[in-house]
Image (cartoon, rainbow, N blue to C red):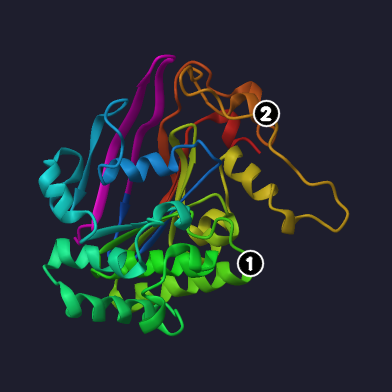
Amino acid sequence: MRMPLLEVSNLTTRFHTRNGIVRAVEDVSFSVDKGQTVGIVGESGSGKSVTCYSLIGLIPQPPGKIHAGSAMFDGIDLLNTPERKLRSIRGKRISMIFQDPMTSLNPYLKISEQLTEPLEIHEGIKGKAALHRAIDALAEVGIPDPEKRIQSYPHEFSGGMRQRVMIAMALITRPELLICDEPTTALDVTVQKQVLDLIKDRQEKLGTAVILITHDLAVVHQTCDDVNVMYAGRIVERAQCQDLFAHPKHAYTRALMKSIPATHAKGERLYTIPGVPPDLSDPPPGCAFHARNTLGDASLCNVTSPPPLVEISPKHFAQDCPGCLAC
């Protein structure tokens, strides 16, 4: 039996603040195979980014703390690896595209310095050799006149071009796993498609596995093989992409899909999920979606304990909450 490239089991991350303990991620498990694209989707504050930041040691500690779980990456538990060892993996074997390229790129440094840094740190390549690799990386992501543009500063690029630079930086060391945190946020539809096509092209050529964090279900449908739907720090549904869109089970997943504007007739009032996500410093004791459940039967929701994730059909998992599974 082939082992997944990454297997996350029972990940629990909390933030200890003055206002109490924020349970950002609770008992999250999923896996990623080589060359596979796995989506993590949900509203803002659902725990998507914190999940992936936990895997590569980017959670500030304190106030953050990983309370439980494991993340096996090619036989290495990322959650229990010394920082020195983790630094040798992060940026080399696992790379990340951050949400906002303008704040992720250093405005004081030229693109050349920022692109060559991973090569110097992880591969010991410096000088002209590193510069040539960086120029090639810009060319591969479609930056015109890369020999000239590599000496530019981030503010001299458009939003779409900065995102391409971030992709080039993430892929320059040929990582085995690429984490994309909302890579198309604030980009227009045309540039968004170009960025997604670019990630897909690089993935196919390099065999890279991808974790895609997003709130955009249309992007998920276009790009992902498997999808994890998160709400209030927990995975509420997990399935293969086509199965999830054809047969959504959990009321939250159905609500997300119903809120897509393209699913409404012209002139029809847009559906919105009522209320707001729960306060994770004081989460409800049972089903977290109970108060917002309008597509199931809220009267049947488990309000005493968090519903477990169970397999309800082959390779299709959902929280075992009678109210959220009711149609």
171 versus 280 height, above or below: below
For badge 1, the amino acid type reads Val
Q: Which mark is residue 189?
A: 1
| Magenta segment boundaries in residue numbering | 1-30
Q: Earlier in the sequence, mark 2 or mark 1?
A: 1
Q: Which residue is outermost to the front?
A: 108
For badge 2, the amino acid type reads Gly
Q: Position of residue 11 (x, y in %)?
A: 30, 36
Q: Nearer the viewer, residue 323 or 79?
A: 79
Q: Main secondary structure of the magenta part?
A: strand
> Can residue 130 be seen in the rendering of this structure?
yes
Mark 2 highlights which residue? Answer: 275
User: Helix, strand or loop at disc 2?
Assistant: loop
Which quadrant of the figure contains the C terminus?
top right
Q: Position of residue 103 (x, y in %)?
A: 44, 51
Nearest to the eye among marks 2 and 1: give it. Answer: 1
Query: Residue 27 lies in magenta, yes or no?
Result: yes
Query: Residue 174 lies in magenta, yes or no?
Result: no
Q: Nearer the viewer, residue 61 or 318?
A: 61
The residue carrying pointer 2 sits among few (fewer than 14), some (14 to 19) or many (20 or more) residues within 10 Å by Cα, namely: few
Going 53% across and 18% down the picture, which residue do you hit? 303
Going 50% across and 36% down the picture, which residue do you hit? 45
Q: Position of residue 292 (x, y in %)?
A: 65, 29
Q: On the picture, is 14 further left or further right than 162?
A: left
Q: On the picture, is 222 further left or further right than 82?
A: right
Q: Nearer the viewer, residue 42 or 189?
A: 189
Q: What distance separates the C-alpha of mark 2 from that of mark 1?
A: 29 Å
Going 56% across and 44% down the picture, which residue do you hit? 249
Please give the count of numbered marks on the rendered protein: 2
The residue carrying pointer 1 sits among few (fewer than 14), some (14 to 19) or many (20 or more) residues within 10 Å by Cα, namely: few
76 versus 220 height, above or below: above
State the image quarter where residue 48 is shown. top left
